[in-house]
Amino acid sequence: MSAIPLAALLVMMIALIITRGADCVSQWGPVLLLGAASLAIIVAAACGTFRFKELKIGMTRSAVQLLPAVPVLLCIAMVASTWMLSGIVPTLICYGLAIIDPQWFLLTCCAVCGLVSVMLGSSWTTIATVGLAFLGIGSVLGYSEGWIAGAIISGAYFGDKVSPLSDTTVIASSACGVDIFTHIRSMMATTVPTIVVTLAIFGVAGAMMHTGGEAHTAEMAGLIRQTFVVSPWLLVVPAVTIALCAFRVGSLLVLVISAALGLAAMFVAQPQVVAEIGGGLDAAFKAIFSGTALATGSPELDALAATSGIAGMVSTVCLVLSGMVFGGVLLGTGMIQSITRALRSRLRRRHSVVGATVATGLTLNACTSDQYLSIIIGANLYRTLYRKASLEAPVLSRSLEDSISVTSVLIPWNSCGMTQSTVLGVSTLTYLPYCFFNYLSPIMSVAVAALGAKIVPGLRRLIPYRSLSNHGKTRIYR
């Protein structure tokens, strides 16, 4: 009975995608999520388990996790628009076209996005900045948007997963009572083999494709220079952004400062662009809120330089809020707890426990539409089971990251999937087949557990494990 709303949502989503296409998810997604939430309330009422007090608690938990993402989404939209119109992204594209070997573009794209994400600690910021630049470079070189977006997302989520600055890394380690660096070392057992396989795939694919876009790069670079002022001074803004992240400034403040610097750079470095989109305050308003379109003489560059501003993120915000309601209803009616109890039943061996954790993580991602809430719920559900099964706490934190943090971007109605598809302008189902790191991670997690490989080299088998008793006191288990 608890699976009925989730099954109904999946069926409706699949039917919508088949009949209307993947692009319709952003338009009809809120309706389907709210419909599934209503169905969940009806089912709970029919079973006699509906309690308004519990529903309120579930909605509150979901809101606490998801509502902070809304201003971050709006700031990401501002950064994407101002960095494009200020010439920062066009400058990165021009320099990238001159430096990057087209044959190794996909490999370079994945590796660089991974490195930047490790430094920033945020896949969202990486994709909205460096990712947009690589998307433009790859389009000029003739690569399909699915392959490009897959390389960008794979690299960005690898860096986000292993960076000590990442919020998901901190949440996963703290929720499971694991030191953050122990958690990161634990993840190396699955993350390193997965990223090596991913880079090998992108390297071979790029070498075999050989799109022949080299002849077009000089022409496109010339068109970019005719439209924008390309200057190394514009790279000061990305450098400041990286420096702020290195000093662990809050992500929201970093995005606000980056957007403000991008807007200032637009007026200083691109007066011709400001004049074309209206000049003065009108240009600033369009850049931030309503979006712009430039006439460059090239359809490809027109599509690349077009921005949507905050208005383009409204549909994503609606999806996030609808996902918040859906996840809150499932929490408040106890349906998530019922589903996870069924998944973790009859667990005896190490790989079966890890496999159930991975399955639960994927289910939670689809149910709650939020990776943070899924990690917290998963940690609470499996903490005691791992202790009874004599499994180390880092195994739990690593399994949650492998199944939740990296797969959230593959679900069209999850906050991560909605955000990245909006920022990159590539639908979730278009880039999904090429996000090798993201869907190989949960497979690798189960495989490593089945093989019995060590979780952390040199780590003692019995690890201090902390949990709170009913009386609020901390107990240490070994």
Image (spheres, rainbow, N blue to C red):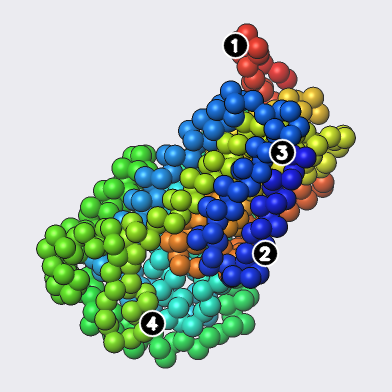
Camera-side residue of 246 and 59: 59
Q: Which residue is mark 4?
A: 300
Residue 306 appears in the picture as rendered: yes
Residue type indicated by callout 3: Val
Q: Which mark is residue 43?
A: 3
Secondary structure under the numbered disc 3 in the rendered image? helix
Q: Position of residue 287 (x, y in %)?
A: 25, 62
- Cα distance in 3D space between marks 3 and 4: 50 Å
Q: Label 3 vs label 1: CA separation?
A: 35 Å
Task: Estimate the x, y position of residue 43 in percent, counting from the top left.
Answer: 71, 38
Per the rendering, the mark at residue 472 is 1
- Which residue in the protein does label 2 denote? 15
Q: Residue at x 41, y 45 (%)?
A: 70
Among the two numbered marks 2 and 1 on one chain, the one whose residue lies closer to the N terminus: 2
Reading the chain from its start, which is encountered first: label 4 or label 1?
4
Q: Nearer the viewer, mark 3 or mark 4?
A: 3
Q: Residue lying furthest left in this view?
A: 280
Q: Label 4: few (<14), some or many (≥20) within 10 Å?
A: few
Q: Nearer the viewer, residue 38 or 233?
A: 38
Find the distance from the CA under tag 2 to the CA under tag 1.
48 Å
Amino acid type indicated by mark 4? Glu
First-in-chain label (3 vs 2): 2
Depth check, mark 3 against mark 2: the one in front is 3
Which residue is drawn at the image coordinates 28% and 58% (left, top)?
289
Q: Name the spot of residue 331 as percent of width and height, x first.
A: 63, 33
Q: Mark 3 or 4 closer to N-term?
A: 3
Image quarter of the C terminus:
top right
Q: CA distance from mark 4 to mark 1?
A: 60 Å
Where does the image place residue 423, in percent across and percent down from the top left?
A: 43, 61
